[in-house]
Image: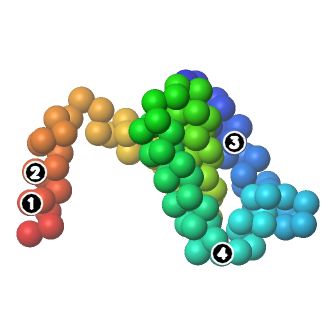
Amino acid sequence: MSDEILRRLDAVLAARREADPESSYVAGLHAGGIDRILRKLGEECTETVVASKNGERDDIVYETADLWFHILVMLSHHGLDSGSVLAELERRFGLSGVAEKAARNKQGQ
């Protein structure tokens, strides 16, 4: 996937965050605060898990798109965007998952 679509979504979400909640789904989520956003995110997580369990490819893609969208809304609520997550993924690229986890565990001690 091109990160261009993520940048475009970031921009739309930033603009809609300040929109009228009566006219924008995203603004309505933000107006409800983090609890409303997280409830919706949890719902989308569950729907994605169920779609995966059922194994219907189109449903998996559809529900994953919903999940990613709502993750972007949650990030936007915290003043973050997809670039923050992409930078973290870039930082981790090439690291062994086992080594990265071990390093986190050492830092937590």
Residue 83 appears in view: no
Name the residue tied to disc 1: 106
- For label 2, the crowd category at 10 Å Cα-Cα, with few meaning under 14, some 14 to 19 and many 20 or more, is few
- For label 3, the crowd category at 10 Å Cα-Cα, with few meaning under 14, some 14 to 19 and many 20 or more, is some
Q: Is residue 38 left or right of residue 9?
A: left
Secondary element at image label 4: helix
Q: Position of residue 75 (x, y in %)?
A: 56, 57
The circle on residue 9 is: 3
Quadrant of image for the C terminus: bottom left
Q: Rounded to the nearest whole Å, what is the CA distance between mark 3 and mark 2? A: 34 Å
Q: Residue furthest front?
A: 54
Name the residue tied to disc 4: 33
3 and 2 marks in contact (CB < 8 Å) = no
- For label 1, the crowd category at 10 Å Cα-Cα, with few meaning under 14, some 14 to 19 and many 20 or more, is few
Q: Which kind of residue does numbered mark 4 sit on?
A: Gly
The circle on residue 102 is: 2
- For label 4, the crowd category at 10 Å Cα-Cα, with few meaning under 14, some 14 to 19 and many 20 or more, is few
Q: Which kind of residue does numbered mark 2 sit on?
A: Ala
Nearest the camera: 31 or 36?
36
Q: In the rendered structure, which disc, 4 or 2, sits on the residue that comes first in sequence?
A: 4
3 and 1 marks in contact (CB < 8 Å) = no
Q: Which kind of residue does numbered mark 3 sit on?
A: Leu
Q: In the rendered structure, which disc, 3 or 1, sits on the residue that comes first in sequence?
A: 3
Q: Rounded to the nearest whole Å, what is the CA distance between mark 4 and mark 3? A: 20 Å
Secondary element at image label 3: helix
